[in-house]
Image: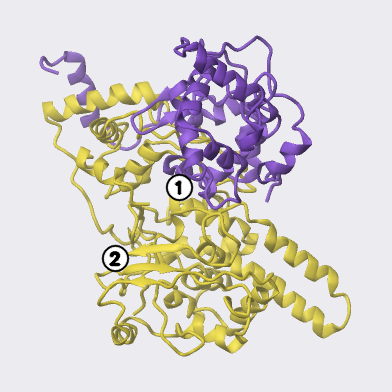
């Protein structure tokens, strides 16, 4: 700021003469809604995934309720370590976290357009095979078994895989392979699966998923198969409020 | 002289653990309709559960996300890291083999069961005020908990503080055991409040400045930096900080028990204390505490910073700060810093904002946060974090503006202070 604006000087003079705390303005009218209560969340978590200075803030609208609640609670209690979330939620009750999860799970927001497909035909075939059939020889289930036929997740605990950027998906695979996003947690099925996948496979999957358009009116599938419920018990049992 | 190194106790947070107490109390009450003696014992345990809440024992004796009372919480101090012990009645890893007398010795004399002196990270310098009767009740309650077998790592105390004779010397200088003695000239209510604040509540453990040996000396509730953290626990005796002499009693009670009042909201360590402990106080006890706090004699704050002279440069900074305020803060806190009653704290006249040092205000802007969910305010409105959005210079500008707008006057905040807060101390 080089030249001094006269308005600034007037404002400045205001500081000098005001003595005591004169609050003249009318009290604010704050709506009694969840939208108002989660302003602290949406500063980062908007309708599109965002990268910030210190991290990556995924879009959370429309993700399954139980999944969101588990993440919120794990952030708060330190099982999923991310300091800003832990500080933000430190003194929030389970009941209130449930309400926040409910709110975001039912929030309808348009999805960002899919990324451009960058895969070769072989990579596309590889991705499709893993998504629809998995690789039983290596105990890799088909992605659709847990994440839903439409890949939009399975209520209430399994997140969808579409509408996420390729780099985010690659990073998540790496995190799972490194022992899992959730610490101090029983062996996690997704961690076991990620360890079986090669980086060629995770790259092909990430590119294919990120380029996949989202159909109108799709949402999480309703039921998880018995087999996968057994295998991924450590996630699906974390639904009770302590 | 008394003192403690108690600490970042309240920084990392644990919660959602409200059930064990109430359910314990209820089941005892229900099971013991038989012999009179057992009924008395049951009542003692219920009372002990309440007192343990008032003393906030669980907060330190529970790791983040861990089993209640199984210990394992890390308290970092300049003297080393203390790892809290398991106080469930497990016979090998907890206090299952302790007697009532052993427990009393720990609370009252600061000595372990084997006679070793304890480090004052355990606030026995305050707990020594607790009566024998209350100590027994708390012990009786702890013995009703489900035993948890959990070995916690030993303390990691740095040289020379790990040299035990030094601890004995420290105790000789700074610690004098003694149960709270009622002041005859004061009301019963006032004395109850003093007992809770000085003893069980161990408020002085945070709200007092420590000397280089971690002792609070003769200082009583005069405010101080909380060890191992970048939080400042404001003075409870200065009307420029968190003194409540000029507050209506009802507002003090409201802040203590719900975490929010028309003037301010509890944040950080205090939010945790409200959520874990104070919200569970009986109406009478909350009131007694407020009566005592309100009666504390006025003292001047430890630190004061001179407001800047309003040079052209300073006014340019304020204008830049104001632009940031209008973009990010005004929606919730209002164009005159008026806030919204019981929802968003006012910034005009808010002592937490004007205080020196400004560390708490810096933290609030960087990390945001929700006031505690309490029975009286279960669904609080939150403050967004701005660490990811604003550069340190911008945080300094907006805070300098807020600290000097609408009648506020306080020292400028520097980008260096904001950087220091970002460094990741809990």
Chain A image colour: purple
User: Could you tell me residue B59's position as x and y percent?
Assistant: 53, 62
- The quadrant holding residue A143 is top right
Identify the residue position indicated by label 2 in the image. Answer: B78
Residue at 23% in and 44% down: B417
Q: Give the answer, above or below, for where B253 lies relative to A67.
A: below
Colour for chain B in the figure: yellow
Give the side of residue A104 with respect to residue B244, left or right.
right
Name the image quarter holding residue B93. bottom right
Q: Which mark is drawn over residue B267?
A: 1
Q: How far separated are the C-alphas under marks 2 and 1?
A: 23 Å
Specify whether residue B248 is in view.
no
Chain of the residue on which disc 1 is drawn: B
Q: Secondary structure at mark 2?
A: loop
B339, A136: nearer the viewer: A136
Is residue B391 left or right of B35 when viewed as pictured?
left
Write the residue at 69% across / 57% down: B19
């Amino acid at each position: 700021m080089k030249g001094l604006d006269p308005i600034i000087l007037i404002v400045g003079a205001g500081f000098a003469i005001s003595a005591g705390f004169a609050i003249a303005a009318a009290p604010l009218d704050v709506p009694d809604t969840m939208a108002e209560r989660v302003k602290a969340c949406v500063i980062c978590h908007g309708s599109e995934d965002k990268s910030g200075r210190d991290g990556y803030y995924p879009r959370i609208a429309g993700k399954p309720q139980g999944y969101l609640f588990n993440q919120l609670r794990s952030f708060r209690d330190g099982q999923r370590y991310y300091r800003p979330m832990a500080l933000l939620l430190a003194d929030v009750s389970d009941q209130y976290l449930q309400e926040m999860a409910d709110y975001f799970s039912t929030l309808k927001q348009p999805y960002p357009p899919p990324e451009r497909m960058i895969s070769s035909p072989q990579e596309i075939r590889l991705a499709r095979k893993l998504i629809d059939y998995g690789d039983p020889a290596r105990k890799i289930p088909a992605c659709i078994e847990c994440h839903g036929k439409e890949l939009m997740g399975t209520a209430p605990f399994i997140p969808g895989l579409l509408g996420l950027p390729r780099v985010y998906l690659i990073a998540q695979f790496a995190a799972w392979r490194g022992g899992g996003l959730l610490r101090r947690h029983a062996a996690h099925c997704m961690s076991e699966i990620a360890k079986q996948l090669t980086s060629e496979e995770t790259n092909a999957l990430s590119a294919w998923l990120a380029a996949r358009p989202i159909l109108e009116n799709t949402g999480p599938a309703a039921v998880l198969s018995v087999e996968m419920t057994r295998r991924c018990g450590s996630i699906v049992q974390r639904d009770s409020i302590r | 002289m008394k003192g403690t190194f108690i600490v970042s106790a309240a920084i990392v947070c644990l919660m959602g653990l409200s059930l064990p107490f109430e359910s314990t109390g209820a089941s005892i009450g229900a099971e013991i309709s038989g012999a009179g003696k057992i009924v008395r014992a049951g009542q003692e345990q219920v009372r002990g559960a309440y007192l343990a809440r008032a003393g906030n024992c669980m907060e330190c004796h529970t790791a983040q996300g861990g089993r209640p009372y199984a210990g394992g919480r890390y308290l970092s101090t300049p003297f080393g890291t203390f790892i809290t012990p398991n106080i469930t009645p497990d016979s090998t890893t907890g206090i299952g083999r302790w007697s009532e007398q052993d427990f009393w010795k720990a609370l009252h004399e600061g000595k372990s069961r084997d006679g070793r002196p304890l480090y004052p990270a355990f606030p026995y310098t305050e707990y020594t005020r607790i009566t024998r009767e209350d100590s027994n009740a708390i012990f009786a309650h702890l013995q009703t908990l489900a035993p948890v077998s959990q070995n916690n790592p030993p303390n990691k105390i740095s040289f020379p503080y790990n040299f035990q004779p030094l601890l004995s010397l420290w105790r000789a200088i700074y610690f004098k055991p003694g149960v709270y003695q009622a002041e005859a000239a004061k009301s019963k209510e006032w004395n109850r409040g003093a007992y809770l604040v000085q003893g069980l509540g161990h408020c002085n453990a945070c709200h007092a400045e420590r000397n280089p040996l971690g002792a609070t000396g003769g200082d009583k509730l005069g405010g101080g930096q909380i060890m191992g953290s970048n939080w400042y626990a404001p003075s409870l005796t200065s009307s420029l900080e968190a003194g409540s002499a000029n507050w209506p009693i009802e507002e003090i009670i409201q802040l203590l028990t719900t975490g929010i009042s028309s003037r301010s909201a509890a944040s950080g360590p205090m939010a945790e204390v409200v959520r874990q402990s104070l919200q569970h106080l009986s109406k009478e006890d909350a009131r007694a505490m407020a009566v005592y706090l309100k009666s504390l004699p006025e003292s001047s704050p430890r630190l004061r910073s001179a407001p800047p002279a309003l040079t052209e440069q300073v006014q340019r900074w304020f204008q830049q700060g104001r632009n940031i305020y209008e973009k990010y803060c005004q929606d919730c806190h209002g164009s005159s810093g008026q806030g919204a009653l019981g929802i968003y704290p006012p910034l005009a006249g808010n002592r937490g904002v004007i205080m020196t040092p400004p560390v708490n205000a810096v933290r609030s802007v960087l990390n945001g946060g929700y006031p505690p969910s309490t029975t009286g305010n279960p669904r609080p409105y939150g403050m967004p974090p701005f660490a990811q959005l604003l550069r340190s210079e911008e945080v300094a500008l907006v805070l300098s503006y807020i600290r000097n707008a609408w009648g506020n006057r306080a020292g400028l905040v520097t980008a260096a202070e904001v950087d220091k807060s970002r460094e990741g101390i809990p």
